[in-house]
Amino acid sequence: MSTFSRLLTDANAAVFMLLAFASVREYRRGRGTAPAWAATAFTMIGAVAWLAVFPVQPSSNIYHALWYQIFIRFVLAVLVAFPYCLYRIAVTFRPPSRVVRRTVDLLTGGLIVAFFAAPRFPGPNEHRPAWLIPYTLALIVQWTVPSIYAAVSLWRAGARRPTAARYRMRLLGAATAALTALIYISALLPQGNANKPNNLIQLMQLAVGVVFFVGLAPPRALVTYWQRPEQEAARIAMSNLMAAVTASEVADTILPHLVALIGAQSAALYNKDGSLFASFGDLPQDAQTDIGESQPSAGKLRVALKNGGSIVVRSTTYSPLFGGDSLGVLQWFGDLTDLALARCASIAREREFISNAAHELRTPLTTMTGLASMIAADRVAMDEAQLQQCVEGLVRQGNRARELVNTMLDMAQIERGTVSFADDVIELSDVVDDSLDFTPAPSDRQIVVKIPDDARVRGDAERLEQVLVNLLTNAYRHGGKTITIEAHHEQDGIVLSVSDSGDGVPSDLIPRLFDPFTRGASANGTGSGLGLAICRRIVEALGGAITYDPTPEWRSRFKVELRKAA
């Protein structure tokens, strides 16, 4: 064998062996049916290519040995199995008809059995028996049918895939077709010495191996180059996403882009309760709710969102072999969606807050404007009692407006995180006493206090007192005659509760009880509707939680969970 032929033989062996290692690596990364068949195919062909490095000498009597006859049958079985494995890769994208499936399975299995049942195979320079002709024809048919099916299926299936996946699938399809053509070319060329291979055939084999390798495991730089259209689309999508101000606008931006980027048939955004919020593409009938799990082998990828919802993309042609990075891409867009939805929710809350604040301020300001206009127009005609009544109204409405503004500023500072909270050891009984001194109970109310002497919590005493004052004020305004303040130890902290014997909060008000500007029908214009909202934010900033937790004994009961002091 010439030096050039030797180099080409070694290069072919190296390329196909690297291809075998790459296919195994892809399988370990993505698992799934398609990677498993790819690893099987290229591991087998890599082993055959490696054997070519050690050619058998024609003068040897090795062709008559039993072990060689068994060995040659295994090699032929590998050659039969290789196009079948490529066919199995292709059918993960485009399932064949039952007739095609059974034909290919029977042809492959039957030919392998026939090879092991055949008489002795002759050596390269020996006479070809007549029975070898049908075997050769059967091998040609068996190689051609699944190979051409695989080549065409991979090429056609790549049409709806993202750019990088499309190029990879079409490279594998082209390499499969080229390998089939190479088999025919080799068969038609005059047979020469096995140790003097045709250099043109070797170069073609090397080119096919390189194309297979690039299709199966392309270099990262090449993948990045292929993905430039998607990267530009992602940049545009991110820009549009930053301009979105509603959840619907976020969905309209993200979902179409995911369908194009991942090559899916549909993408859907679900609410935290699993109900469908928005979708794009051909959504299946059974996809109206999120069942909460990914099924990559069935073409379903799901990523959970931090707000409790989820994004799900579906495709009947999904395969981990070419979409193994799709879950990472989906997770990345899921994170962007989380940020966008959180920003939209914040914008919605701010708009609602501003609208409610304007509505709340309008009442005292309108009253003050009316009283001031009355004084300016009729001051001469008004007696001292009328003038005093107007002035008192101005002071009362001014104080109400000032209290409302201060409360809103306080709440805004807490939400922005600009308020610092102390982390001291607090005697809970002292905070309760100070709260009662600041807001003494009306004469017709009975206050019952049950605070253990060893009830000590960590937090900010002034802010905790603010919470208690709000809860006591609500109880005085809307509660019953008996008000109980008690605390008890729990494993992870101390629970402080404020209960009263009133009728409790109306059931329709409970879901939004801690939302800003929430007031019941019995409020009669009193209060700002911000007290409980501020209580929640303070308690959460102190590392605790506040809930409305009525009991059969106390129909109105607020429970505050606090951190226990060591």
Image: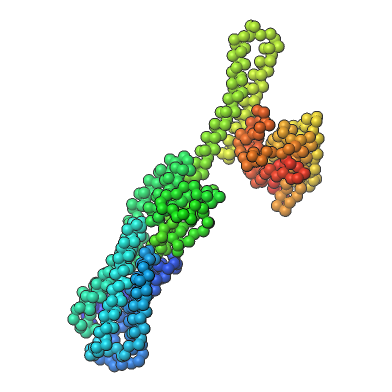
Residue 250 sits in which quadrant? top left
Q: Residue at x 66, y 46 (%)?
A: 544
Give left or right: position of 515 versus 553. left
Give left or right: position of 237 versus 559. left
**314, 475: nearer the viewer:** 314
x and y percentages locating residue 548 in the rendered image: 68, 43
Looking at this view, name the residue that lies furthest to the top. Answer: 380
Q: Residue at x 59, y 36 (%)?
A: 413
- Is residue 176 in sight in this rendering? no
Q: Residue at x 36, y 64 (%)?
A: 94
Q: Is residue 348 above or below residue 443?
A: below
Give left or right: position of 334 versus 434. left
**440, 510: nearer the viewer:** 510
Residue 24 sits in which quadrant? bottom left
* Color style of the picture: rainbow
Looking at this view, name the residue that lies furthest to the left. Answer: 190
Looking at this view, name the residue that lies furthest to the front. Answer: 99
x and y percentages locating residue 28 in the rendered image: 44, 68
Q: Where's the N terminus, which quadrant? A: bottom left
x and y percentages locating residue 524 in the rendered image: 67, 28
- Is residue 302 in sight in this rendering? yes
Q: Is residue 203 above or below residue 478?
A: below
Residue 392 sits in which quadrant? top right
Q: Residue at x 27, y 72 (%)?
A: 179
x and y percentages locating residue 384 in the rendered image: 70, 9
